[in-house]
Structure formats: C-alpha cells, structure tokens
Amino acid sequence: MAILERIQSCFKNVKEMPFILGSLCSGGMIAAPILLLFILLPIADWEIDGRAMSYQEMWLSGDAAALAACFLLLAAGAWGLAARNRASRWPLVLSPVIPYALLTIFRALLPAPAEPIHVDVATSAILTAVVIYFCLFHLRPVREYLDGVGK
C-alpha cells in the first residue's frame, strides 16, 4: 500500500508544478518507462535514422543501449522531480548528453569502423543540457516547487 501512496503523492505533486514542467514531467513519468520496456523487450522493430532495425541489430549497433540510457534517465528524473527530490534534476540534465557519449564509446569499440557522432548533433545535445540545467536549477518557480512553497 505504501507504494500506491507514494505514486499518488507524486502525481499530486505534479499538479503543484509550474504548468509546462508538470506537463513534461507527467509525460516522462508515463512514457519513459513504457518506451524503456519496448527497448528492453523484443516487442517491435525500430527505425533509426531512416533504417529499419531488428531487436538484435539495435543492441549490436549500440543504439538500443543509448536509447535505454536516455529513457532510464528521463524516467528517474521525472519520478524524482515529482517526489521533490532535488538530486533528480541531474538525470534530466544529463539525459540529452549521456546517450551520445555511450554511442560514441560503443562505436569506438566496434571492430568495423562506424560513422562518428556529428559535431552538430553533439553541440545540440550539449546546448539542450545547458537549457535544461538553467530551467531546473535557476528558475524561481521550479525552486519554489522543490522547496515545497505553496504546499
């Protein structure tokens, strides 16, 4: 019963978040775990960069590991933020960068040469992380939510 109470408390907290943050957070709380299951279980084939890939191809290419890391970070961050856990902001900040770092490492370890991550993609991921950092750490409404102001 305690788990259900915590889940209810998290969804109640989402309603107290600033509107846009609450919308994004509730989406992350629901969609990220579902998409993580789709990555971990051989439920469907995927299309990555316009190329259809089977479950096995996705894991061998490193794309599945990168996507799984992204969904895991998003889920952890969203649920943590809904629980008013200040540290949970960091998985959300790192969620655009870590998947590309994993993909770069994985591609470097492949026996056959693989296409590297483009500079514009890496730059975009870093800039997205900076914007997320600014929003979660420096916007007053987010800080007030985490402090429990208005409870």
Image (cartoon, rainbow, N blue to C red):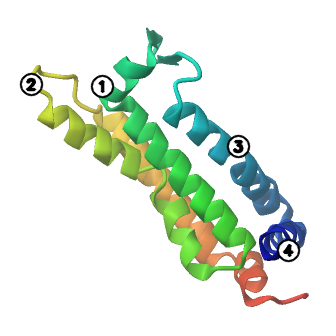
Residue 134 bears which disc, if any? none
**Badge 4 vs badge 3, beta-carbon distance below 8 Å:** no
The kind of residue on which mark 4 rests is Glu
Q: Earlier in the sequence, mark 1 or mark 2?
A: 1
Q: Quadrant of residue 146?
A: bottom right
Residue tagged 4 = 5
Instruction: Locate the C terminus and report the quarter of the image it occupies.
Output: bottom right
Q: Which residue is mark 3?
A: 31
Q: Residue at x 19, y 23 (%)?
A: 114
Q: Position of residue 63 (x, y in %)?
A: 38, 30
Q: What number of labels is visible?
A: 4
Discs 4/2, front? 4
Q: Earlier in the sequence, mark 3 or mark 2?
A: 3
Mark 4 vs 1: CB contact within 8 A:
no
Give the residue number, with chain letter if any, for mark 2. 111
Q: CA distance from mark 3 to mark 1?
A: 24 Å
**Alpha-carbon span between mark 3 and mark 2:** 34 Å
